[in-house]
């Protein structure tokens, strides 16, 4: 984990502890656990540490899903936007490109990175933006040739825009969700309530980090991953877990939300990318 991630951890968990207050003894124990996790910065990824801290906080407060309300609101907001944008995508000159840009715009719906996001403003920005890295035509070609497509889901709300994008494929897709609630990442229930199960087969990845960390995922998921001939990875969290994978099957779709990722991928913060690691 990059040491610069520490500030984001402190900010997000301070916010959570305002929402779910701990007693003084719990505050001390959580602070001690937090410091112990930071000692693992050189050996663990950011999503793994996020997962461990989240699990410990949930144990203290006895709440299974810390973002239940936020996820519900995000899904409802995105479903309303789906009704607005689905006809526009269908009528557009290039439904693939419009749906792709909307899917990337949906990546703003991230309570881990920024709780004050504006989806409509982000859509306007993404529709006009030049992508910092743009392998969208490579992805189009890969989609045309793919038989086994795996789509790695990211956040609640965002999943609705993923659904709209997947509807343009005209092919069978397997959509992967996390196996337990962490941040506002999508779970099986989020996939069900947003209608993703109408357009894709839903599978869990076998782990509850806000990422895809292959050595932690289930054997069943790994089999699907290994057999896919195209893997679409949504969001910064999944990118962090797969950051060193030089796999031609992988395409990352995301908004660059922090300087750590910006420096790694050589793209400006707040830029948008469609990135193939060997492209």
Image (spheres, rainbow, N blue to C red):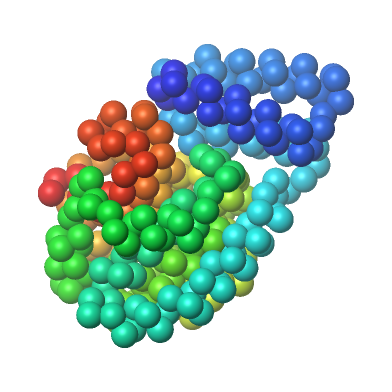
Q: Say whether residue 224 is visible.
A: no
> At 76% from the left edge and 33% from the top edge, which residue is drawn?
18
> At 30% from the left edge and 70% from the top edge, which residue is drawn?
98
> At 27% from the left edge and 49% from the top edge, which residue is drawn?
273
> At 54% from the left edge and 61% from the top edge, which residue is drawn?
157
Position above or below: 167 against 256: below
Numbered-mark total: 0
Q: Quadrant of the N terminus?
A: top left
Residue 135 or residue 238, whichever sits in front: 135
Tell me residue 23's x, y (percent): 86, 25
The answer to whether residue 142 is left or right of residue 253 is left
Position above or below: 25 against 63: above
Quarter of the image holding residue 191?
A: bottom right
Tell me residue 66's x, y (percent): 70, 46
The answer to whether residue 80 is left or right of residue 4 is right
The answer to whether residue 148 is left or right of residue 202 is left
Tell me residue 110's x, y (percent): 52, 48
Tell me residue 67's x, y (percent): 67, 49
Q: Say whether residue 77 is visible.
A: yes
Residue 186 or residue 258, whichever sits in front: 258
């Amino acid at each position: 984990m990059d040491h610069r991630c520490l500030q984001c951890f402190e900010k997000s968990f301070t916010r959570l502890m305002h929402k779910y207050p701990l007693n003084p003894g719990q505050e001390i124990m959580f602070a001690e656990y937090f410091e112990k996790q930071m000692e693992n910065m050189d050996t663990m990824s950011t999503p793994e540490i996020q997962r461990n801290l989240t699990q410990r906080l949930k144990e203290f407060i006895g709440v299974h899903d810390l973002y239940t309300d936020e996820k519900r609101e995000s899904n409802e907001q995105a479903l309303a936007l789906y009704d607005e944008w689905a006809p526009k995508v269908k009528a557009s000159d290039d439904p693939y490109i419009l749906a792709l840009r909307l899917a990337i715009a949906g990546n703003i719906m991230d309570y881990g990175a920024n709780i004050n996001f504006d989806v409509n403003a982000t859509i306007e920005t993404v529709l006009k933006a030049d992508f910092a890295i743009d392998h969208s035509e490579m992805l189009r070609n890969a989609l045309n040739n793919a038989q086994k497509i795996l789509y790695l889901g990211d956040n609640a709300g965002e999943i609705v825009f993923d659904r709209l994008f997947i509807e343009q494929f005209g092919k069978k897709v397997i959509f992967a969700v996390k196996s337990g609630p962490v941040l506002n990442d999508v779970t099986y229930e989020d996939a069900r309530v947003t209608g993703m199960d109408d357009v894709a087969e839903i599978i869990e990845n076998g782990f509850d980090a806000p990422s895809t960390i292959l050595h932690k995922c289930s054997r069943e998921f790994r089999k699907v991953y290994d057999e896919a001939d195209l893997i679409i990875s949504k969001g910064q969290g999944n990118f962090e877990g797969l950051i060193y994978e030089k796999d031609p099957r992988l395409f990352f779709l995301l908004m660059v939300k922090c300087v750590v990722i910006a420096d790694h991928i050589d793209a400006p913060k707040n830029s948008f990318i469609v990135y193939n690691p060997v492209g």
